[in-house]
Every structure is written in structure tokens, then in C-alpha cells.
Image (cartoon, rainbow, N blue to C red):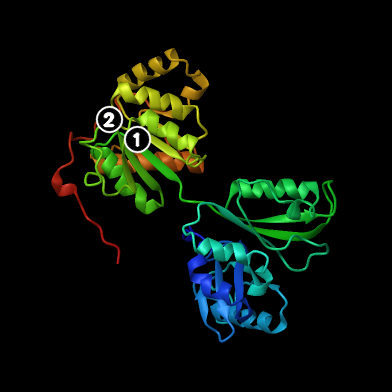
């Protein structure tokens, strides 16, 4: 099985690093991975900048073809003409310029001056870091038709006329879909609206969004463990509880923020402020129907990635009846992950956190049938594993070296 690739470090993630290049674009070129196949070390969108004297900022291959990419950047600085360069396996003994991992990648290499139309917005974004959401639109070289100049967009805003006026409606729709999906994508520009029309150009769309949010309602030991486990996975973690004695930063050092507020009031305010999206996960761990029912009713009516609630099967049954009695449609109740987590035999708060995060990941990534949430199993929530509690001697600390 190939090793997982690290996340792309795009232009929008590297704004601070690329600030000198954007301030002096005549002296810099930029290289961006636009397509990959098989096993390669970096995904599409990964970028590096190269100065005329050979100084490089960033990496597009983890070292395999870095020198060749630097040479390509220096060439486009001399010619002033952008190019797409492809790298595959080096040669028969793997010692040539290429990817010894066996994959291939295509790299867009262009003078930084090609981004002239977007540079003012990019420079301004450096002053307001971190940016919340943005998308950089660029045309790949070799187009047979005029394409929009590079531009920095807010994915939530309507596309500007300077973009839509230059594209057929079919490409406009594909561009909107790419912006909604996020990540790095290529949008083809077709010669007409019908299927089978030739591709006359390609647009590179690089989207940046803030980290996905995990909101935990109920400030207890499981919440603290969940915050500590989720943060290294890239979640922006909020712990919220109406009880000021428990909702403290000292009790939840893994959370980015700890809020003292009634859960339903907090969730409604976050929704009204536009701080939730389809990647947001909500975990209700409070065991208190005075707060749980209201926040679950709200969350299940929103377009969220995951809503889970802690409790026994008896608690879940009562909770489900109360939610239905309160007017929640049965179809929305089926979205609730309760009892929360995957059935991995978790006992300690730290293990429960792993079980919850595993289910969140499965829900977001579309886990297959081998992943069995507790709601799809029968019997006690915590089936016997031969012991009632995990002894302290089982607590092992692992250090990666």
C-alpha cells in the first residue's frame, strides 16, 4: 500500500513564505504541481518559488526532481514563457532525473509576473493572515482561446464578469463546482456546450478553506480527550458548556477555544455568523437532556458532516422519542450517530476519543461496510472484553523518532 501523501502546501498556504517573491515578481518564478499519477510524494497544488539566483522556497517533490524544477524556473525567467513540465520515472536504473517512486507529475512553471492581476490581492492577504477562504484561478499555457487572467476569488461570492464573460456556460458551471468542492482542480474549457467538444484550454483552481471545525458540547473528561486527539488531525476544536466551573481552558488544553454558553444558543450563533459548513462535526457529550435535545434538534437540521451524541442505548431511545415528539422529522433523526463512536471496545476517555474520531472520519470519507457504528450493532454499548476497566499498566506512551 502506498504511503499517504502529505497535504498540498499551495500558494495560498505559503503566502507568508512567498511574500518576497510577490513583492519583487520580476526576479521570481513559481512552480505548481497540477497533475499526478500513481505514487508521488506531493499532491496537486503543491508550490515552490525560485529566485533568479537559484534560491528556492518550498518543495514540489520532496527532493526527487527539485533541481530540475529549479532549472525549469530559471528557464522561464529567461524566456518569459510559462510551461508545463512532466516528470516520470528517471531511467532504467532509476538514477536519472525523475521520480524513483514510479509515479509521474506535471508541474506548471511560470514567471511570477504572470500572476500580475492577482498579486495585489495576494499581497493584501498577507497583511490579514490567516485568510479564511480564498481561491486562486490561473490559466495553464497552450490555450487556443483567451482565458481569464489570474485572479484571487472568494469562493462564496458570485464569479466576476471578467471570468464568466470569457468562458462558455458549461465551463462556468464546472468552475463553480470546483470552487464548491475545494482543493486543487483542473477545469477544462470546451469549444462548445455539447459533450465531445474539444478542450481549448485549462484553468487551474486552487482553493483554500480554514480547517474543519469540531464543536464539542459538554465539558467532561471525554471532551478533553476528544479535543486533545482531534487537534493534531487538523480540526479547529471548540468545547462549549453552560457550566463555568467545567468550561475552562485549564480543563481542556487541547481545544482552540472554550466557551461558557448554553449549547443551543452557541450553535445558533455560530450558524448565524456563517462559521459552520458542510465539513463541521458536532459531538454532544453532556448527558443532560435539558441542553442535549435543543442542540441536537438544531444540529440535525443543519448541513453538517457529522452529528453524534453520547449515551447508552436506553438514553438514545428516550432521546430519539423526545426529538421526534418535538417535531424533528424521522429522516433527519437517522443522521444522528448515537450511541456515538465505532465499536472498538473503548473504555478510557482517550480510547473513547479515538472511537468517536474514527466514526467522524468514516462519515466524512464514506467508510465502507467493514466500518460498523455502534448504532448498527446490537447488545450492550460496551460489550465485555474480559475486563471491566483498563489497568494503568496498559497505558503506553509511544514516541515517534
Identify the residue shown where x is 37% and y is 22%.
293
Picture residue at 56% right of the left edge, 87% below the top: 53
Q: Secondary structure at mark 1?
A: loop
Specify whether residue 94 is in view: no
Where the C terminus falls, by quadrant?
bottom left
Measure the C-alpha gap from mark 2 to mark 1.
Answer: 9 Å
Residue furthest bottom in the image: 53
Rendering coords of residue 200 (x, y %) = 81, 60
Relative height, residue 106 to residue 148 (above, below): below
> Toward which corner of the image does residue 337 lie, by quadrant?
top left
* Residue on which disc 2 sits: 383
Q: Residues within 10 Å of mark 2 (few under 14, many from 20)?
A: few
Is there CB contact under 8 Å for labels 2 and 1? yes
Q: Is residue 298 visible?
A: yes
Q: Quadrant of residue 123?
A: bottom right
Q: Is residue 39 left or right of residue 190?
A: left
Q: Residue at x 69, y 84 (%)?
A: 78
Horizontal side, residue 395 vs residue 265: left or right: left
Left or right for 338, reference 43:
left
The percent coordinates of residue 165 (x first, y second) are 79, 52
Q: Which residue is mark 1?
A: 343
Residue 82, x across and y down, in percent? 70, 74
Amino acid at each position: 500500500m502506498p504511503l499517504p501523501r502529505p497535504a498540498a502546501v499551495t500558494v495560498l498556504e505559503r503566502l507568508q513564505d512567498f511574500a518576497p517573491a510577490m513583492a519583487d515578481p520580476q526576479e521570481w518564478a513559481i512552480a505548481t504541481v497540477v497533475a499526478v499519477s500513481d505514487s508521488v510524494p506531493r499532491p496537486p497544488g503543491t508550490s515552490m518559488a525560485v529566485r533568479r539566483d537559484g534560491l528556492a522556497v518550498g518543495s514540489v517533490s520532496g527532493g526527487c526532481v527539485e533541481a530540475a524544477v529549479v532549472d525549469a524556473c530559471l528557464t522561464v525567467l529567461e524566456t518569459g514563457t510559462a510551461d508545463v513540465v512532466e516528470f516520470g520515472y528517471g531511467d532504467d536504473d532509476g538514477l536519472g532525473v525523475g521520480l524513483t517512486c514510479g509515479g509521474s507529475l506535471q508541474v506548471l512553471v511560470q514567471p511570477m509576473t504572470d500572476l500580475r492581476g492577482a498579486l495585489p490581492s495576494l499581497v493584501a492577504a498577507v497583511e490579514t493572515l490567516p485568510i479564511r477562504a480564498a481561491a486562486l484561478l490561473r490559466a495553464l499555457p497552450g490555450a487556443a482561446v483567451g482565458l481569464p487572467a489570474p485572479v484571487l476569488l472568494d469562493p462564496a461570492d458570485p464569479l466576476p464578469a471578467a471570468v464568466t464573460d470569457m468562458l462558455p456556460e458549461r465551463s462556468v458551471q464546472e468552475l463553480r463546482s470546483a470552487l464548491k468542492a475545494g482543493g486543487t482542480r483542473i477545469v477544462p474549457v470546451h469549444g462548445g456546450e455539447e459533450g465531445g467538444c474539444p478542450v481549448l484550454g485549462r484553468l487551474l483552481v486552487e482553493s483554500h478553506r480554514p480547517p474543519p471545525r469540531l464543536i464539542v458540547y459538554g465539558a467532561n473528561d471525554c471532551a478533553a480527550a476528544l479535543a486533545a486527539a482531534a487537534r493534531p488531525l487538523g480540526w479547529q476544536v471548540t468545547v462549549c458548556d453552560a457550566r463555568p466551573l467545567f468550561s475552562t481552558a485549564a480543563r481542556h488544553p487541547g481545544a482552540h477555544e472554550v466557551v461558557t454558553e448554553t449549547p443551543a444558543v452557541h450553535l445558533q450563533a455560530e450558524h448565524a455568523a456563517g462559521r459552520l459548513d458542510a465539513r463541521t462535526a458536532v459531538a454532544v457529550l453532556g448527558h443532560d437532556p435539558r441542553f442535549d435535545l435543543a442542540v441536537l434538534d438544531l444540529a440535525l437540521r443543519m448541513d453538517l458532516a457529522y452529528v453524534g451524541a453520547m449515551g447508552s442505548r436506553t438514553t438514545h431511545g428516550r432521546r430519539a422519542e423526545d426529538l421526534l415528539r418535538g417535531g424533528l422529522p424521522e429522516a433527519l433523526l437517522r443522521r444522528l450517530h448515537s450511541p456515538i463512536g465505532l465499536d472498538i471496545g473503548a473504555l478510557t476517555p482517550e480510547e473513547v476519543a479515538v472511537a468517536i474520531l474514527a466514526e467522524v472520519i468514516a462519515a466524512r470519507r464514506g467508510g465502507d461496510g467493514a466500518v460498523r457504528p455502534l448504532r448498527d450493532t446490537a447488545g450492550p454499548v460496551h460489550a465485555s472484553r474480559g475486563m471491566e476497566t483498563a489497568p494503568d499498566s496498559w497505558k503506553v506512551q509511544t514516541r515517534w523518532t
